[in-house]
């Protein structure tokens, strides 16, 4: 008798209500659309996440590597009850947030990856996914961890999260924090924004294609320069490198 | 007293710099030396406010002298709060003007992002009065907020005016490749849209997030020389023509009228008197907009506009590029960033860039005179400089 191993390996997803798209205005005056993306669009996201694996700053490398694995797991049916939201500005990918449902009353936040910095795009994305957990899926609380100091400030401090340190989070087994419905309600007026419905022209632009970010985070000029300079107190190598770079730019 | 000229300028990108403090100062200094065509100096002054506390490093000027192989030049660090940069330029001026030295390197540097934002805010707050301000939790944002509230009540300044300064300066930084903030903002996004309160929350009411400068790392440097040396080097002849420095009460509550920035007024008057210029003669200015309200108030105190009318001039576009007196065309502290010890030197760097005609997209057409205003404490130690292009 043959056994279809795929049926064993593939988790059974529970039905989850869809996220209703919304949009909001950024400090720049641009509109950002938040919408749910499904399996067919995951390959587009993977293309834009992969370069960030090589960005050795602000933990982009760790977060991007994990997001890549989570998206791939979702795409290849190796992740249970995951959802993915994309934030797009004029079609361009600005952030990805994802999470999953653990039980009908418990959610788990996976990642918030901002591909454009400085406009609270990541913060808006995080708020949107909490809205999805609490308001749409009806979760009582969401388990959260931060992998960077920026994330810690944005989630643990701004939302005043409660400790659930007895629960190891799925991300690295580290102690969890939790956003409860009550905490979310308290934060709602200050941190959760967005307008619905999304005007058709904005939504259509977002749905048309996930365009690559035009100004993604990039690696530092030379991630080893600071380390090397510890052995090179005159900083000669760094300065020479910068001058060579400038010369190159002048000649370009 | 001899005339003093700026023969070289250098700057690093203002951002988060994960390099040792000495290296940041040295890089800006090497750029300035290269610009001037010099390999030796007589004296080095390094402006810095927080290295002993924030970076656990002292005797910074000695370190810079050695790292640049400028031995055996004299070297001293100068700490004068956020006005350290211009105070160091003043010291450099005195050294050259007195005839003691012919070539002086003045560098300013700060690496504030080595600590988190709360610690950085606390470190800057140590300049407040220890017994009547600091121990009660007063910080610079709270000082500026109280000042802004008084200004609003007395002169009719509104949050819209503050946001206008923020938008003007942050967007001006887009034309300055060295500036920290390279992100366009709009009035709609930070003030008028339903999301504005989340995008731009109150930090210390009535000041919001985009009313404050960022916490930055960075370095800047200038080379001051005698007239003979300047002629020999062949760089554009830009004279440091006026210097004024003044102090005010340490505790702000002791001021008779807290909305009057008397030290700014006095420093500017002295700089004008020394240079023989008047406010109307200034083509381009760098004011200390650590908070947006300060640009408005300072533009009045340095004599560009009557008291209480800075915000009206702002509304008319008189302080924008192309206006009657363009202010902070390189982004100011708001857009370029504010590594405190470097700021006064960076302001001079911008003015010299302008007077050389090297401002690119932010160039003030035909600029021949410039002014910088470096505001220390909460206005209790202020240095004003004027520059004139002579050739």
Image (cartoon, coloured by chain):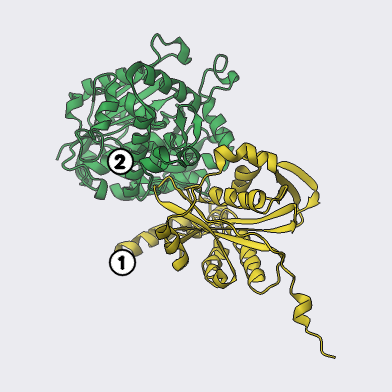
Within-10-Å neighbours for mark 2: few <14, some 14–19, many 20+: many
* Chain whose colour in the figure is green: B
A29 displayed left or right of A181: left
Within-10-Å neighbours for mark 1: few <14, some 14–19, many 20+: few
Q: Does dot 1 land on a helix, a strand or a loop?
A: loop
Q: Does dot 2 land on a helix, a strand or a loop?
A: helix
Picture coordinates of residue A210, whole percent (x, y): 47, 66
Q: Which residue is mark 2?
A: B350
Q: Which residue is mark 1?
A: A252
* Chain whose colour in the figure is yellow: A
Looking at this rendering, what residue extends furthest in the right direction? A1
Vertical position of residue B358 compared to residue A160: above or below? below
Most foreground residue, B267 or B316: B316
The image quadrant where one finds the C terminus of chain B is top left
Most foreground residue, A188 or B328: A188
Q: Is residue A167 visible?
A: yes
């Amino acid at each position: 008798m043959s056994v279809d191993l795929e049926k064993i390996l593939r988790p059974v997803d529970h039905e989850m209500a869809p996220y209703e798209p919304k949009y909001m205005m950024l400090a720049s005056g641009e509109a950002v659309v938040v919408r749910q993306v499904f399996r067919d669009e995951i390959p587009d996201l993977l293309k834009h996440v992969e370069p960030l694996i090589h960005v050795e700053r602000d933990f982009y490398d760790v977060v991007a590597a994990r997001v890549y694995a989570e998206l791939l797991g979702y795409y290849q049916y190796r992740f249970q009850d995951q959802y993915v939201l994309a934030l797009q500005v004029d079609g361009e990918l600005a952030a990805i947030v994802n999470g999953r449902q653990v039980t009908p009353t418990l959610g788990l936040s996976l990642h918030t990856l901002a591909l454009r910095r400085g406009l609270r795009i990541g913060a808006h994305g995080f708020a949107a996914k909490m809205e999805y957990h609490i308001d749409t899926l009806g979760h009582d609380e969401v388990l959260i961890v931060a992998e960077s100091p920026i994330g810690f400030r944005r989630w643990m401090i701004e939302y005043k999260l409660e400790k659930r340190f007895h629960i190891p989070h799925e991300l690295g087994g580290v102690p969890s924090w939790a956003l409860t419905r009550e905490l979310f309600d308290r934060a709602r007026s200050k941190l959760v924004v967005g307008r619905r419905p999304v005007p058709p022209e904005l939504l259509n632009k977002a749905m048309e294609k996930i365009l690559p970010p035009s100004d993604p985070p990039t690696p530092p000029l030379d991630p080893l320069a600071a380390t090397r300079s510890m052995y090179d107190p005159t900083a000669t190598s760094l300065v020479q490198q910068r001058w060579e770079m400038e010369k190159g730019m002048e000649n370009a | 007293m001899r005339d003093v000229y700026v023969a070289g300028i250098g700057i690093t990108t203002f951002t988060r710099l994960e390099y040792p403090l000495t290296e940041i100062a040295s890089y800006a200094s090497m750029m300035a030396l290269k610009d001037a065509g010099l390999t030796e100096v007589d004296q080095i002054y390094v402006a810095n406010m927080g290295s002993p506390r924030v970076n656990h490093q002292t005797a910074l000027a000695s370190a810079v002298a050695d790292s640049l192989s400028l031995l055996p030049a004299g070297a001293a660090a100068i700490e004068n709060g956020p006005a350290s940069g211009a105070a160091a330029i003043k010291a450099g001026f005195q050294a050259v003007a007195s005839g003691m030295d012919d070539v002086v390197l003045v560098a300013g540097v700060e690496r504030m992002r080595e600590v988190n934002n709360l610690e950085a805010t606390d470190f800057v707050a140590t300049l407040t009065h220890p017994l009547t301000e600091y121990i009660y939790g007063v910080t610079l944002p709270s000082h500026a907020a109280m000042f802004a509230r008084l200004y609003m009540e007395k002169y009719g300044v509104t949050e819209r005016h503050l946001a206008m300064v923020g938008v003007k300066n942050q967007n001006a930084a887009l034309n300055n490749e060295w500036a920290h903030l390279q992100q366009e903002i709009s009035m709609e996004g930070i003030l008028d849209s339903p999301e504005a309160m989340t995008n731009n929350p109150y930090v210390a009411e009535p000041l919001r997030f985009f009313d404050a400068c960022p916490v930055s790392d960075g370095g800047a440097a200038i080379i001051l020389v005698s007239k003979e040396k300047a002629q020999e080097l062949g760089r554009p002849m830009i004279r440091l023509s006026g210097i004024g420095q003044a102090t005010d009460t340490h505790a702000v509550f002791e001021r008779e009228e807290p909305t009057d920035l008397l030290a700014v007024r006095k420093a500017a008057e002295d700089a004008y008197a020394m240079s023989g210029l008047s406010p109307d003669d200034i083509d381009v200015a760098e004011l200390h907009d650590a908070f947006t309200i300060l640009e408005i108030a300072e533009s009045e105190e340095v004599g560009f506009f009557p008291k209480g009318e800075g915000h009206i001039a702002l509304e008319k576009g008189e302080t924008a590029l192309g206006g009657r007196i363009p202010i902070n065309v390189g982004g100011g502290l708001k857009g370029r960033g504010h590594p405190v010890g470097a700021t006064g030197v960076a302001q001079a760097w911008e003015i010299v860039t302008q007077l050389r005609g090297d401002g690119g997209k932010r160039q003030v057409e035909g600029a021949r005179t410039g002014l910088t205003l470096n505001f220390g404490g909460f206005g209790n130690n202020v240095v004003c400089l004027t520059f004139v292009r002579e050739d």
